[in-house]
């Protein structure tokens, strides 16, 4: 089995036409993850956008800009969020997860 040829190396800078295509691809992926997920679980997209923006800024600061990434929401969390809403709300699930994290921290 032959290895596929890489389009860009890690240190390479894309040409302007490649940069535009990669940016559009990233925009479509980011929009789906950051705007569509909150709509599906009946939450505010503004909260998701603010949270992902703050998370991205924190990530860039921690990695000192060495890893260009955008942190958005994930489709993997749709089922747990819907289940938490059915059991009393996402706030209760967040408090429960925080207490579990605190308890595990004590054990470890």
Image: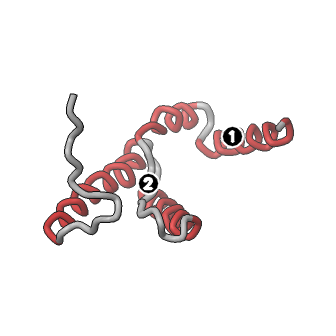
Q: Position of residue 90 (x, y in %)?
A: 59, 43
Please indicate, yes or no, whether residue 53 appears anywhere in the rendered image.
Answer: no
For the point 72% across and 44% down, the residue is 98
Residues packed near mark 2 inside 10 Å, few (<14), some (14 to 19) or many (20 plus): many
Residue at the far front: name it: 2
What numbered label is drawn on residue 51?
none
Q: Residues within 10 Å of mark 1 (few under 14, many from 20)?
A: few
Can you say which quadrant of the picture contains the N terminus? top left
**Residue that lies at the very extreme toward the right in this rendered image:** 106
Q: In this figure, which residue is indicated by the disc labeled 1? A: 97
85 in relation to 46, above or below: above
Where residue 40 sits in the image (x, y, percent)?
A: 38, 42
Find residue 72 and name its label. 2
Marks 1 and 2, Cα distance to the nearest angstrom? Answer: 20 Å
Residue at point 79% right, 43% down?
Answer: 102
State which quadrant residue 83 falls in.
Answer: top right
Q: Secondary structure at mark 2?
A: loop
Quadrant placement of the C terminus:
top right
What colour scheme has been applied to the protein in the rendered image?
A: secondary structure
- Depth check: give the residue in front, 91 or 72: 72
Q: Is any part of residue 79 visible from this angle?
A: yes
Q: Earlier in the sequence, mark 1 or mark 2?
A: 2
Q: Are marks 1 and 2 in contact (CB under 8 Å)?
A: no
Q: Measured from the top left, where is residue 100 in percent x and y?
A: 75, 37
Q: Position of residue 36 (x, y in %)?
A: 34, 49
Quadrant in which residue 63 is drawn = bottom right
With 19 as the anchor, is 89 left or right in this view? right
């Amino acid at each position: 089995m032959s290895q596929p040829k890489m389009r860009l190396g890690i240190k390479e800078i894309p040409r302007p036409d490649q940069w535009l295509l990669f940016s559009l691809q990233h925009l479509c992926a980011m929009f789906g993850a950051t705007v569509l997920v909150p709509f599906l679980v009946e939450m505010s997209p503004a909260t998701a956008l603010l949270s992902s923006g703050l998370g991205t800024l924190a990530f860039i600061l921690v990695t000192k800009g060495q890893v260009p990434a955008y942190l958005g929401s994930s489709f993997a969390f749709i089922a747990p969020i819907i289940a938490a809403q059915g059991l009393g709300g996402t706030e209760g699930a967040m408090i429960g997860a925080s207490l579990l994290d605190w308890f595990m921290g004590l054990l470890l």
